[in-house]
Image: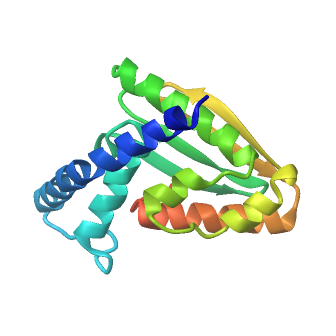
Amino acid sequence: MSRRHAVAPFLVAVLLLPAACAEAEAQAHAHHASHGGQPADSSRGDSAFAAVQARGRVAMGVDQYTSEHRFDDLADGGRIELQRDPADTAGVRTIREHLQQIATAFAAGNFETPGFVHDREVPGVRTMAARRDRIRYEFRPLPGGGEVRITTRDPDAVKAVHEFLAFQRMDHHVEVQE
């Protein structure tokens, strides 16, 4: 692939991001107003959360406000789940493609997508990248999207995965599911 073709998707994302951020911020304000409250982490404010949502929409290809994320810690690693209404077959297909790409990228030690979405280095990724040969990333389809199951027997890698997932829960305002 030529360098120009490799850079093109990134340029499209950069050009679309300001409009996506404005739309996401408006959605965040409407969502919080309709629920009579503030965002789960009001210390960061609606603007920061809306920006994460907008960058997530660019990176993942689906509206973050109409999709459900889960980030679960497990004894041997964890899992990332992303789903939406199963009737939205195009959205489900987009989620599955994204999660398959994430599993492949993470296995190669590439954590650029979470860095882009969160606009900073995400906790745990340095260790996950350094210990990539000790961590397995497996995509599994789910009715409304899919999941990436992360497994390892390395205690330091498990700790890094848990740091990564905790940060994801916090920045995406996702509550822990029991």
- When the figure is inspected, residue 152 is found, relative to residue 140, above or below; the finding is below
- Residue 63 appears in which quarter of the rendering? top left
Q: Is residue 79 above or below residue 8?
A: below
User: Which of the image's four quarters has the N terminus?
Assistant: top right
Residue at the image point whose x is 32% and y is 76% from the top:
44
Which quadrant of the structure image shows residue 76?
Answer: bottom right
Q: Residue at x 34, y 22 (%)?
A: 88
Seen from the viewer's position, the closer of residues 164 and 130 is 130
Give the number of marks: 0
Q: Is residue 51 above or below residue 106?
A: below
Q: Which residue is pictured at 45% across the width and 62% down the height? A: 118
Q: Is residue 14 left or right of residue 31?
A: right
Position of residue 80 measured from the top left corner of the image (x, y, whole percent): 58, 47
Q: Quadrant of the C terminus?
A: bottom right
Answer left or right for 96 relative to 51.
Answer: right
- Residue 5 lies, in percent from the top left, at 51, 32
